[in-house]
Image (spheres, rainbow, N blue to C red):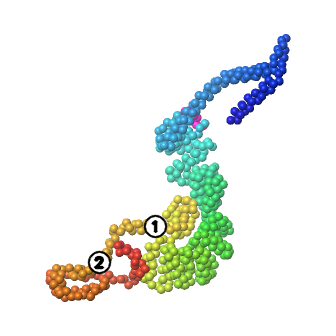
Amino acid sequence: MIRILIFLAAVFALGLGFAWLADRPGEMVVTFNGYQYQVSLMVAAVAIVAVVAAVMIVWWLIKSLWNSPYTISRYFRVRRRDRGYQALSTGMIAAGAGDGALARKKSKEAAKLIRSDQEPLIQLLEAQASLLEGDHEGAREKFEAMLDDPEMRLLGLRGLYLEAERLGDRNAARHYAGRAASVAPQLAWAAESTLEDLTGHGDWDGALKLVEAQKSTRQIERDAANRRRAVLLTAKAQALTDSDPNAAKTAALEANKLAPDFAPAAVAAANLLFKQNDVRKGSKILEAAWKAEPHPEIAELYTHARPGDAVVDRLNRAKKLQELKRNNAESSMTVARAALDAQDFSTARREAEAAIRMDRPEGAYLLLADIEEAETGDQGKIRQLLSKAVRAPRDPAWVADGVVSERWAPVSPVSGKLDAFAWRAPMERLGQLIDSHEDEADVPVLAAPAKPTKEAEVIDHPAVAKTISEAPTEPKPAVGDDQVTPVTAAAFAAIPNDAEPVEPAEELARLPDDPGVDPDDEAEKSPRRFRLF
């Protein structure tokens, strides 16, 4: 567009120049070799322009003839290159579609038409064709050859990393990922694998540097980077608690600042502050974390902040936590535990029952069993509460990749993933219930005894039935559900001597320590299945 404007401007300038000369007539005299030539100024200007144009045309012709060999060779070279790129494009599409034979054919064709040093993608196509053909050794050789080319080095490291992962060689895979991460930390696959390697070896400082590099390259968001830093700093604080308490405290406080709702960071920071007799600051950290998300580890550390406190003081601190987070099952459980230690059984029982109404946790029933044992020692009620605890949903725990842990850990013991542990209820109880339904076919079903009717009140024997039918009918009082009509003596006398004796039914006696059925749960029980709990 700019060139067109420049051309139009030049034509316009020439037109203005010729118009200016036409408005100002004049003559031009040229004396050459004894001859005098006189022409008008307009004719002289046109002649000069024609001579210049003729010189330019002649120069272009001479230049074209001079450069014709190079032009012809360049034409064929461009045509050859276009055919090579067409073969390369077709081969890449074939490799992506899984057509190894076509990919190998096109890679050879492209290698003939284009030199591999001019187009590095030919090496990639050859490696992909080798992988499709099952020649993994040849593919690894191609990827190793790419390491010498700065432009292809990352691609070669990626290929070698995937091959190591395929072979199950984690050390080699992490080696290649570490080399790639040192050059380009923005690569997600390299950074994640290197991060798992660093955290697996406990190199928390190296992991922190890598996360900072990821944040600077905008590979991860700011919130995700802060979360990772908080996890790594918490792990560092736990590792340095005994060897370097000051460095551990600094790391824990920074982790708590990055993620105030992260319970392990708050617990680690408060624990280190309590060891240095800074109870006030540690309590504030725990209170802020409790407001964000109540956690039993926070409650345990908060109530035992001062080892010399009496049980009543610990109960008061538990009540303070309850005021910070009302109508919460964990708050009620905290007060109930502290009240049990203080022998305040009424408060402990009330708070445990409140926790059951809010969440029905397994631990609340177990705590009620402890309260019952400490207060009354009634084994029947204790066994009843324990049976309810078995059926109740499990309490939350630290779970990662199917592993349940009582304590938080920075990485998963199965996959090595960072920040894999989550505070939630395990799923094992659900699996047990599903298995129990599958085994119901092998459990004998005890049917409830039917209520006796008038036809069933008489002994089922022909002679007895005939005697009773011939006996005079007398009015009988109303028979209730718990009342049985007696059999008359005439009925027994009518039984023949060769009749088979009938064994009396055994009475199902209740065990002495059996607590029986809770009246509140009696209406919820279904007589269709017999279950132990």
Quadrant in the picture for the N terminus = top right
Q: In the rendered structure, which amino acid carries the disc numbered 2? A: Ala
Residue at 43%, 76% in the rendered image: 387
Give the side of residue 527 with respect to residue 88, left or right. left
Dominant SS in magenta: loop
Q: Residue 214 in magenta?
A: no
* 89 or 111, nearer to the observer: 89
136 and 52: which is toward the camera: 52
Using a 10 Å C-alpha cutoff, classify the residue at mark 2 as few (fewer than 14 neighbours), some (14 to 19) or many (20 or more): few
Q: Are marks 1 and 2 in contact (CB under 8 Å)?
A: no
Asked which quadrant contains residue 13, the reply is: top right
Number of the label disc, if any, that sits on residue 428: 1
Numbered circles on residues, count: 2
Cα distance between the residues tagged 1 and 2: 38 Å
360 lies left or right of 446 = right
Looking at this view, name the residue that lies furthest to the front: 23
Disc 2 designates what residue? 450
Q: Is residue 324 above or below residue 185?
A: below
Label 2: state its secondary structure: loop
Residue in view at x 46 percent, y 85 percent:
377
- Range covered by the magenta-colored residues: 112-117
Q: Nearer the viewer, residue 477 or 290?
A: 477
Q: Secondary structure at mark 1?
A: helix
| Of callouts 1 and 2, the N-terminal one | 1
- Mark 1 residue crowding within 10 angstroms, few (<14) / some (14–19) / many (20+): few
- In the rendering, at what x and y percent does residue 412 appear? 54, 62
Would residue 438 be seen by someone viewing this image from the given angle?
yes
In the image, 92: left or right of 469? right
Where is residue 226 drawn, in percent x and y?
A: 63, 61
Q: Amino acid at mark 1?
A: Glu
